[in-house]
Amino acid sequence: VFVQKCCEDYEIMVDNKCTFTNETNQESWTPVFQGVGAHVPKYRLVTGIPVCVMTQQWPIYHNSTDRLVMLADGTLRHYTLQEADISDEDLSDENNLSNDYKQGFYCRDKKVDSRSGQVLDVAIVCVPKVGGGWHDADWRMRKLLDPTLHFICIVAYLTVSIVHFVLPQLRDMVGNIMTTVCICLAVSQAADIVSIFTELHSPMSFITADIVMFVSLLAAFLWLSSLGFYIWKTFRSRNVFLRITDGRKYCYYSYGVWSLTIVISIIAIFAHFILDIPATKAASEPSAQGTAIGWLGIAMFFLPIGFTILLNTYFCLSTLQIMSNMASCGRIHHKLKYLCWGANKCP
């Protein structure tokens, strides 16, 4: 059973900041499960304040009118009482309002008020989103229009990839790269659709979909760079009668692109889970991320994409300059010239 703790195992909250327990007179917080009897489930603490993407973070204190109960499956249940004299053992769902928070949407810890010295049991939760449906414009945009446009993009990408894969005239090195790019973009769009519908229900599926989306998008840009390099290298070659199809060359390109994609993705995921989690964070600070991946992880993904754009710009300008100085063009040049901007020098 996973239980989310706001601070590290050796820390507690002092005035909304994580502080080492050896600097206070308090012990670290440990979960107490409700309704498990003598059998206490095995649990593992997962530290960190929940990332509330589309909702607000809100602190809840265990007091006379608000009760925090940890269930045996790691779910946090918040009771809102009408009568303050009810004990924790007499809590029931029939007579009291309650709301459950799954792992990833809450964190619990011990909090000390430095002014009064009062010790409190606090939970920081992602406020459940109220509303939605056909009458909500935001819901229609995010849950209906956005997935529909993503689906249209997927159909377009798959159509292009199938055409390049089926037609023999397009089944060459350029066609194989275009097919791979379209498949990567289609996977990215599909992962984005999954993240739209799982952002408030399954944190693990949400972050997995985000990782798949960024990895496939990175792979698409790297494949575009390989296409630019292939065209640039082809026009620089002195042999104008080049082979159009070359499966072995595509395999070499695949090894290079996918290896670089895996290495960059591992570095970005490592940066997100290890380096992008601050040791101390205010409990009332709202989340700034628009996705499950933190800013450092996003930067690690998009920094190589920025370099690929600059590299492709160089390939394009250099190829246009080479084409302007060419007296004759080979068969491959006639086909590749349409992939460059404004090329009109080959007869």
Image (cartoon, rainbow, N blue to C red):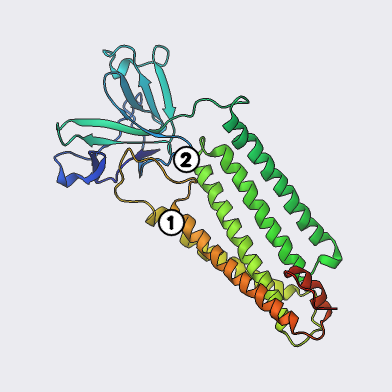
Horizontal side of 237 relative to 20 (left or right) equals right
Residue 218 image position (x, y, % from top left) = 58, 60
The type of residue carrying mark 2 is Val
For mark 1, give the secondary structure: helix
Under mark 1, the amino acid is Leu
Which residue corresponds to mark 1?
296
The image shows residue 121 at horizontal and vertical percentages of: 26, 31
Q: Secondary structure at mark 2?
A: loop
The residue furthest bottom is 238
Between 44 and 258, the residue placed more toward the observer is 258
Residue 43 visible in image: no
Q: Nearer the viewer, residue 311 or 326?
A: 326
Which residue was labeled with disc 2? 53
Q: Which residue shows up at 25% across the image and 37% down it?
A: 29
Q: Residue at x 59, y 71 (%)?
A: 311
Sequence-wise, which precedes: disc 2 or disc 1? 2
For label 1, count other residues whose C-alpha is less than 10 Å away and answer few (under 14), some (14-19) or many (20+): some
> For the N terminus, which image quadrant?
top left
Residue depicted at 57% across the width and 32% down the height:
138
Q: Which residue is found at the position 77% from the left and 87% from the top? A: 239
State the CA–CA distance, disc 2 to disc 1. 16 Å
Left or right, 325 with reference to 331 = left
Q: Position of residue 196 (x, y in %)?
A: 58, 40
- The answer to whether the residue labelled 2 contacts the one labelled 1, judged by CB atoms less than 8 Å apart, is no
